[in-house]
Amino acid sequence: MKNINLILLTLLALLIGSCSQQPGQVKVEGGLIQGVVTDDLLIFKGVPFAAPPTEDLRWKAPQPVEKWPGVLETFEYAPAPMQGGEPASGKSEDCLYLNIWTPAKSAKEKLPVLVWIYGGGFSFGSTSDPVHNGEHLARKGVVVVSIAYRVGQLGFLAHPELSAESPNGVSGNYGLLDQIAGLEWIQRNISEFGGDPDNVTIFGESAGGISVSMLCASPVAKGLFHGAISQSGGSFGPTRPTTYPGENMKTLQQAEQDGIAYVNRVGVSSIEELRQIDATELPLGMGMGGAWPIVDGYVIPGDQYELYEMGKFNDVPVLIGYNSDEGLSFPGGRTPQDYIDNVNRRFGPFADKLLKAYPVGETSVPRSARNLMRDAAFGWPTWAWANLQSEVGSSPVFFYYFDQHPEFAEDSPQADHGTPHGVDVPFVFMNLNADDPNVSESDLEISEIMGTYWTNFAKYGHPNGEGVTEWPKFTKENPNVMYLGPNAYLGPVPDEASLKVMDAYYKWRRTPEGKDWAK
């Protein structure tokens, strides 16, 4: 009987051992995770990449992930980060999770990795938005990852007390450190999902595209990615005490003063007391101060434009661009006089030149005027980035202009409308609904083209390949721009003459006179 029991125990142990890692299970640091198995993909949602940034870890750099017992089911998205706006349902301070879509059949495949960073003005956003679903891109032969990061004051509050307790003597930029921690986790773990840690491309839109730009200039992110795609991003404006789109950055000292004002506004006297307040009770979001990355001297060492001029950036291939009518989403004035007043307020001595370059109508604020907002915030930073890297760097630049939109009748109020901010995201992710009557055949075609260009770029470091129009790199001598919509074709730099006036403004802003005026 003892021998039979021994045999049974041995067989049971062998059975348990053979079944210890079921289909869809992957071992990562922290423990074993179980994903969803489909016919052609493995999908993992809500994978922890850092410890919850709560209690004493609030306003600290992300810490190593905590180990868990047994098998962690990763079937659902984790909560969005805490943010302002609607009630806190579906949001949590415990938010540092990522999601993975992989077509790999084994861990040996070494597929290129595309890492998504969401937008939302650094005050909003999450990985769970349906348009960020990575399955269609993954089916093009890449591993897609989306990473969460803290937003609002929980992600970007600077304060003298926080700087004093930091080993680097700085504060703010916790959201960027979250992104970097996610990329570090990918370096250590993505091979288990069939991904190649030596071929990682980061991509993002709006604040996500700006994040991509900042990571390209950050020494802390060096070596964590090998290509970068920025959609309506770029951070090349100088610092300014009163910020505007395109001039969003403050110095650490300025941001610390905003942090002091924030603590006073909440009605406490110290960071220790602020950490005792439940996250749902904290005022968060735009207009509260401190909800944007800053030039801290550590994550972001200095003025990014000047860093690039000196060759101090992570020199990787980049694919960068913006939408044709970004200003439609960020009106610079509802009436002609509002527009003129806003231009004078922001640009001061340069206002007259910019009003000529971006003229307003007698009774309307037309596309020509809206383009000032587009170029100040997105067009000029992208164009400056392309020029700087093509001059100073060794890696190629690929420049695009997204102009896919419905054609409106000439007598329609929308006659001059182009493509607003954010419309590109579902096109890139190939998440357009073919059954939607508002989605045209042309939309589906350009979405397929964009998905191909983006995944080709992740695979090869350039967007070219079979079935798509050849996309040459951008250089100062040959400033090639790929126009996307309704077909893919090469064209000139959009509104280049106006961009040169904007460029002159930004150059003046870096002179002693311009710096003094901005104060």
Image: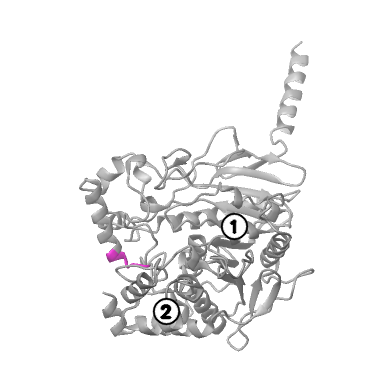
Q: Which residues are magenta?
A: 249-254
* Residue 252 on the magenta segment: yes
In the picture of the structure, the residue carrying the numbered disc 1 is 115
Provide the secondary structure element on which disc 1 rests: strand
Which numbered dot is residue 22? Answer: none
Q: In the current view of this chain or complex, which residue is farthest to the left?
A: 269
Q: Nearer the viewer, residue 148 or 7?
A: 148
Q: Quadrant of residue 250?
A: bottom left
Q: Quadrant of residue 447?
A: bottom right
Residue at the far top: name it.
1
Per the rendering, the mark at residue 306 is 2
Badge 2 or badge 1: first in the primary sequence: 1
Secondary structure type for disc 2: helix
User: Tag 1: residue type?
Assistant: Val
Alpha carbon distance from label 2 to label 1:
27 Å
Write the residue at 72% across / 63% down. 442
Q: Residues within 10 Å of mark 1 (few under 14, many from 20)?
A: many
